Image: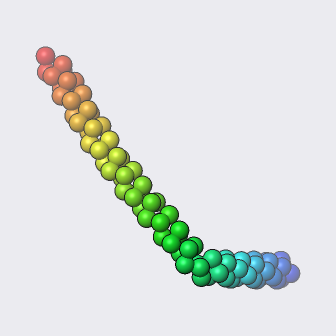
Amino acid sequence: MAQDKSTQQDQSRTGCSVLAFLSGAVAGATALFLSKKENRDKTKQAVNQAVDKAKEVADDVAKQSQRVKKDAEKEIKKITNKVKK
């Protein structure tokens, strides 16, 4: 049982070490990539395009949900009127 805990702790430490290494590698690669003005400009443009697209999608979803709401209200009124008759 004690050996199982020790093995689990070793695996956990190894996992943390690998994660730390990968995080550092990603941070370094990002810093190197963004050190060039051209890459920063491209990244900024891509982020702005993604933000604009996300806003468009959010607007479309809001409009669609309003249409669904109106359609549901119409159907409810139709059914209510049928039940009253």
Q: Where does the image place residue 76, in percent across and percent down from the top left? A: 22, 30
Work out which quarter of the rendered image holds the C terminus and state it: top left
Work out which quarter of the rendered image holds the N terminus and state it: bottom right
Q: For this view, does 19 lie left or right of residue 41?
A: right
Can you name the residue that lies furthest to the front here? 38
Q: Where does the image place residue 72, in percent across and percent down from the top left? A: 26, 33
The answer to whether residue 35 is seen in the rendering is yes
Tell me which corner region of the image, top left, top right, bottom left or bottom right, holds residue 66: top left
Can you name the residue that lies furthest to the top here? 85
Q: Where does the image place residue 73, in percent across and percent down from the top left? A: 22, 34
Looking at the picture, tell me which residue is in the foreground, 3 or 26.
Answer: 26
Residue drawn where x is 48% and y is 70% of the image: 44
5 relative to 62, above or below: below
Residue drawn where x is 57% and y is 73% of the image: 39
Tell me which corner region of the image, top left, top right, bottom left or bottom right, holds residue 4: bottom right
Looking at the picture, tell me which residue is in the foreground, 15 or 80.
Answer: 15
